[in-house]
Each structure stands twice: as C-alpha cells, then as structure tokens.
Image (cartoon, rainbow, N blue to C red):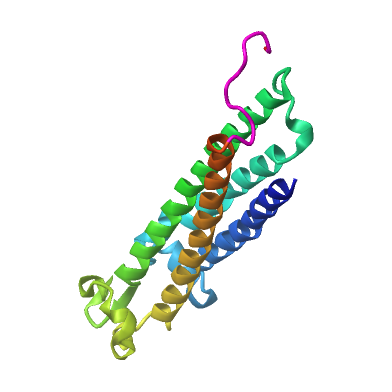
C-alpha cells in the first residue's frame, strides 16, 4: 500500500512539471514579451522542436494520467486472477514510465542543445547565431553578450528559460526512472508472481 501511494505521488508530480514545461516553452517564443520575433521567425531554431510544449508537456500529461489510473486498485481487473491483473498493470506502468523517460529525455537534450547554441539575434553583421562557434563558453562570459543587439536581453532570456526546461525535464526523467526501477523490482523480487499459472485464465 505504501509503495502504491508513493507511486501515485510520483505520478502526480509529473503533472505540475509538465504544465510548467509548457509555460516555459511558450515564453521562449516571446523574448521580453514581444510577439514580432516569433511571427518573423527570428528565434533560435530549437524552440520549433516543441520540446517543452509537446514532449515534456502534453505527452507527459498523458503519461501521468495513465500512470495515475494504473495506480488505482479498482483497475486491476484485466483477467480473472488478481495476481495476473497486477502483473499486467505493472508491465503497463513500466512501459508508460519508459515512454516518459523518452519524452522528457528528448526535451532535456533539445533544451541543452539550444542552451549551448545560443540565441538567434541581430549583431553588427546582421541576424545570426552570434555564439554558435563558442561551444557554450559564452555562458560563463557575460561580457560578450552585448554582441546581441536585438532582441534586448535575449541571451539572458534564452539561458534562463532553457535552463529551467533542462531542470524540469531532468526531474521528469528522474521520476519516471524511479517508477521503472520500482516496478521492475516488484517483478524481479517477487512481490507477486509474474508467471501465469495454467487454468487461471
């Protein structure tokens, strides 16, 4: 019962993380609250991968909802044997938790790439990725951020929001990984038999 309640808490934690991922990703489209850059496609290309809106957001909401349903004891009725039903619920939980790792992992990787690449901004040479060749070194050297003339403060905007996305998706990966390990331990450590006995179904 305790592990089931813990699993439900972990699944519930995915919901606010997903909602915040959606909000943060949306903010990336509007540097300093301005909509003109999104409409003229003057944003870093990684925001168009919808990592926070779709993968770490909507898809993780679906995963969280399914996991919460699977945690409900009343849903363990997929076959005649309660032991058999729990086995299938555990396998389904592992599958959806693994999908959660994939979705949030995608967001984590894309956000990290967007952070290292730097913003698409207007410099003295025109619109370009001013820090693309620095391999992320610009992140620790704020003195060169003034190369980006427009949008104003776009470097700070990108660094903060991409870092938040990395943190949110990283937490999602950890939560889903804990769930996979927990469900796998139930099978391997014999909380209930994973072998369907003849004549039960």
Horizontally, is 98 left or right of 4 in the view? left
Q: Where is residue 7? Give x, y as percent.
A: 66, 49
Farthest top residue? 199
Q: Nearer the viewer, residue 92 or 102?
A: 92
Q: Tell whether position 58 is magenta.
A: no
The residue lying at 57 percent from left, 48 percent from top is: 179
Q: Is residue 51 above or below residue 130?
A: above
Quadrant containing the N terminus in the rendered view: top right
Q: In the image, is 169 to the left or to the right of 80?
A: left
- Answer whether residue 29 is visible to the viewer in this image: no
**Nearest the camera: 104 or 194?**
194
**Hey, which residue is sitting farthest right in the picture?**
74
What segment is highlighted magenta in the picture? 190-200
Q: Residue at 64% across / 54% down in the picture? A: 10
Residue 75, by quadrant, is top right
Question: In the image, 131: left or right of 166?
Answer: left
Quarter of the image with the C terminus in it: top right
State the image coordinates of residue 137 (x, y, percent, origin top left): 26, 78
Q: Could you tell me which residue is drawn at 38 percent across and 58 percent down?
A: 110
Name the spot of residue 72 as percent of width and height, x first: 75, 39
Q: Is residue 198 shown in magenta?
A: yes
Q: Residue at x 29, y 80 (%)?
A: 138
Q: Determine the residue located farthest toward the bottom in the rendered image.
A: 143
Give the left or right position of residue 109, taking residue 138 as reference.
right
Q: Is residue 173 visible?
A: yes
Expressed as whole percent of the image width and height from the top left, the position of residue 169 reads 50, 59
Q: How many marks?
A: 0
Between 70 and 158, the one nearer to me in the picture = 70
């Amino acid at each position: 019962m305790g592990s089931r309640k813990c699993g439900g808490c972990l699944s519930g934690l995915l919901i606010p993380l997903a909602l915040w991922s959606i909000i943060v990703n949306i903010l990336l489209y509007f540097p300093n609250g301005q909509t003109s850059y999104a409409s003229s496609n003057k944003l870093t290309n990684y925001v168009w991968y919808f990592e926070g809106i779709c993968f770490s957001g909507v898809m993780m909401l679906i995963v969280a909802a399914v996991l919460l349903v699977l945690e409900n004891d009343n849903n363990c009725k997929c076959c005649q044997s309660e032991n058999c039903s729990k086995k299938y619920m555990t396998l389904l939980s592992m599958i959806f938790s693994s999908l959660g790792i994939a979705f949030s992992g995608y967001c984590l990787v894309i956000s990290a790439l967007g952070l290292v690449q730097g913003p698409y901004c207007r410099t003295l040479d025109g619109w370009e990725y001013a820090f693309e060749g620095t391999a992320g070194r610009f992140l620790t050297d704020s003195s060169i951020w003034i190369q980006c003339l427009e949008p104003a403060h776009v470097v700070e905007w990108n660094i903060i929001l991409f870092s938040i996305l990395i943190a949110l998706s990283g937490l999602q990966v950890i939560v889903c990984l804990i769930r996979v390990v927990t469900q796998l331990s139930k099978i391997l450590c014999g909380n209930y038999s994973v072998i369907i006995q003849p004549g039960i179904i």
